[in-house]
Amino acid sequence: MEVLELKPINNKKITIYLIDKMRINPELNDIDLLKDLININDVSFITVEINNENFREFKNSNLSIIIGALNLEYHLLDIPEYAYGYLFEEINKKEEQIRELLTEYKNMDDKNSLKGLNLKSWIDVLQKEINHDKSILETKTRPQWIVKKILDLVRLHQHEELCVIHFFHERTLAELTKQLRELHIEAIVYELNNFHNIPYIIIKQEGNN
């Protein structure tokens, strides 16, 4: 069983181009632009967040069409099923509790009674907790696992300098960049058809370990 542990790779210079997976289109010239990006930077492999999508859904997507035309090694990344299941189990318990409380609340004759008001208040509290837990799962835990899996793939390559393209989902970007910054990795948020792409993070400084 994998453990979520993020350790810097000190013996490699790593550059990651981060591209929003929802903003690409095979009907435009995105394939040619990506081929240029790959050739110029000698990209080693591509990673893709699938975010609970199954493999069939990915194969039918625009992104799959584009990646297929690039003829480069690629990997689909997501939080491990056992980790996702463990985290979502607590959310499911709260959702079941809300369903039971809602049934009781709907069957009450006097919803404005003290008991009714307390019941409604408790339902609202549980719903806020669920929303918070889901947000943490999607915007914190999932991107942390994705960064770990990218690093695991990087470690399999012998090159001292490595360039990777990662297709991200918008909601994971903030945590992705935060984790990459802490791991001393240069990341570039890259927009196709934009000639002013600049490094989003430049971490490695002279004398930095």
Image: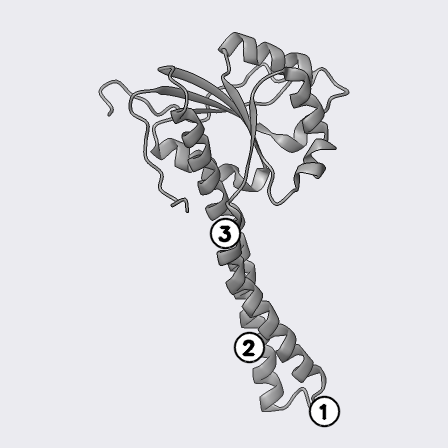
- Of the residues tagged 3 and 2, which is closer to the observer? 3
Q: Earlier in the sequence, mark 2 or mark 1?
A: 1
Q: Which residue is mark 3?
A: 82
Q: Which residue is mark 2?
A: 122
Element type at marker 1?
A: loop
Q: CA distance from mark 2 to mark 1?
A: 18 Å
Q: CA distance from mark 3 to mark 1?
A: 43 Å
Residue ranking furthest to the front: 1
Q: Is residue 4 in view from this perspective?
A: yes
The kind of residue tagged 3 is: Tyr
The kind of residue tagged 1 is: Asp
The kind of residue tagged 2 is: Trp
Residue 117 is situated, as x and y percent measured from the top left of the image, at 60, 84
Q: Earlier in the sequence, mark 3 or mark 1?
A: 3
Residue 192 is situated, as x and y percent measured from the top left of the image, at 63, 20
Q: Which residue is mark 1?
A: 109
Identify which residue is drawn at 59% across, 89% down: 115
Residue 132 is situated, as x and y percent measured from the top left of the image, at 52, 59
